[in-house]
Amino acid sequence: MIHWLQHVPFEGLGSIEKYLIDRGHELFCTRLWAGDRLPAPDSIAALIVMGGPMGIYDYEAYPWLQIEKEFLAQVVGRGIPILGICLGAQLLADVLGAKVNANPQKEIGWFPVIRNKTVPDLLESVLPEKMTVFHWHGDTFGIPEDAVNLYSSEACAHQAFLYKKHVLGLQFHLETTLGSAAALIDNCRNELVQASWIMTEQEILGSEDAFYKVNDCMFAVINKFFHLKG
C-alpha cells in the first residue's frame, strides 16, 4: 500500500490522490494533526510526506513531530521509497542529518528552478533541465550526506535532493492544483506580503495551465520513483 502523512487538514495530496486511485493503487493516510496512529513501518510499500505551515522543530506546539521523525528514520532504514514535499522534505533532510533553517527570503508563487548537472539515472528522464514550479516555503534544508542536490532557484540554493535512490525531497510543489492552492491561500493568506519572491493571490491562481504542467511532471516522477505500473 501507499501511505501518506498529513500535517494540516488543508494540505492534502493534491493531484496525486486522483492519479493513484484512478490507477488502482490503495492509499492510506495518517492525519498527524488529528492524532492518528502511525502504521508499522514494514506494512507500507511507499510513503509520501506532505507539507504544512509549521517548522520541523516546533515540538511544543506539535509534539507529534518527534514521533513522526522517529517513524521516518525507521522507514528510511528499511529502504522503502519515500517522497517528501516541502515540510516533508525538510523533515527527511533533518532525519538524514542535514540542517534545516530559515531561507534568506520566503518563496511563494511561480518561480523557475534549474536542474543541477549531476542527476542520477533513476530520475534524469523525468526531471526537466528548467521548469517553473509552485513554491510556498520560508525554510530550507541542507543536502544530506550521500544525497545529490537536484535543483536550485535564484532565491533558494537547495530545492530538491535524492538520497540513495529511495528518499526524494522536493522543496517545491508539483502536486498542487488550482483548488489546493486556493485552500493554502485561504489558510495562510497572512504570508502573502509584498516581497521580492512572494506573488499575489491573483498571480498564483492566474493560470490553470501552470498547475496542469507541474502535475504532469509529478505523475512522471511518481511512476519512476515508486516503480509503479498502470
Image (spheres, rainbow, N blue to C red):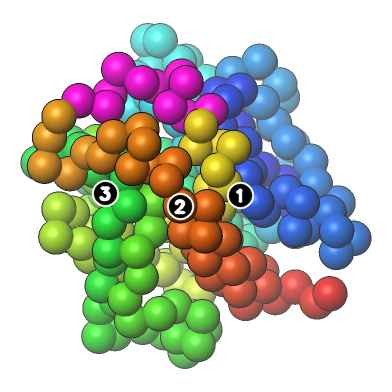
Q: Does residue 1 lie above or below 201 as drawn?
A: below
Q: What is the chief secondary structure element of the magenta stretch?
A: helix
Percent x, y of residue 115? 29, 76
The residue that disc 2 covers is: 207
Q: Nearer the viewer, mark 3 or mark 2?
A: 2
- The picture quadrant where one finds residue 128 is bottom left
The answer to whether one can see residue 218 in this image is no
Could you tell which of marks 3 and 2 lies nearer the N-terminus? 3
Check whether the beta carbons of the residues at disc 1 and disc 2 lie within 8 A of each other. Answer: no
Query: Which of the numbered marks, if any, corresponds to residue 23?
Result: none
- Seen from the viewer's position, the closer of residues 33 and 43 is 33
**Is 151 covered by the magenta stretch?**
no
Q: Secondary structure at mark 2?
A: loop
Looking at the image, which residue sits at the far top? 60
Q: Badge 3 is on which residue?
A: 141
Give me the residue at 29% from left, 85% from top.
118
| Image position, residue 192 (x, y; %) | 27, 27
Question: Dot 2, how many residues are within 10 Å of its Cα: few (below 14), some (14-19), or many (20+)?
Answer: few
Element carrying mark 1: strand
Vertical order, 25 against 101 (above or below): below
Residues at marks 3 and 2, CA–CA distance in whole angstroms: 29 Å
Q: Percent from the top left, x then y, of residue 3?
A: 72, 46
| Residue type at numbered disc 3 | Phe
Left or right? Give the position of 99 relative to 87.
Answer: left
Residue 186 painted magenta: yes
What segment carries the magenta color? 183-193
Residue in the picture at 30% in, 17% down? 190
| Amino acid beneath label 2 | Ser
- Label 1: which residue? 48
Element assignment for label 3: strand
Report the side of 118 relative to 12 (left or right): left
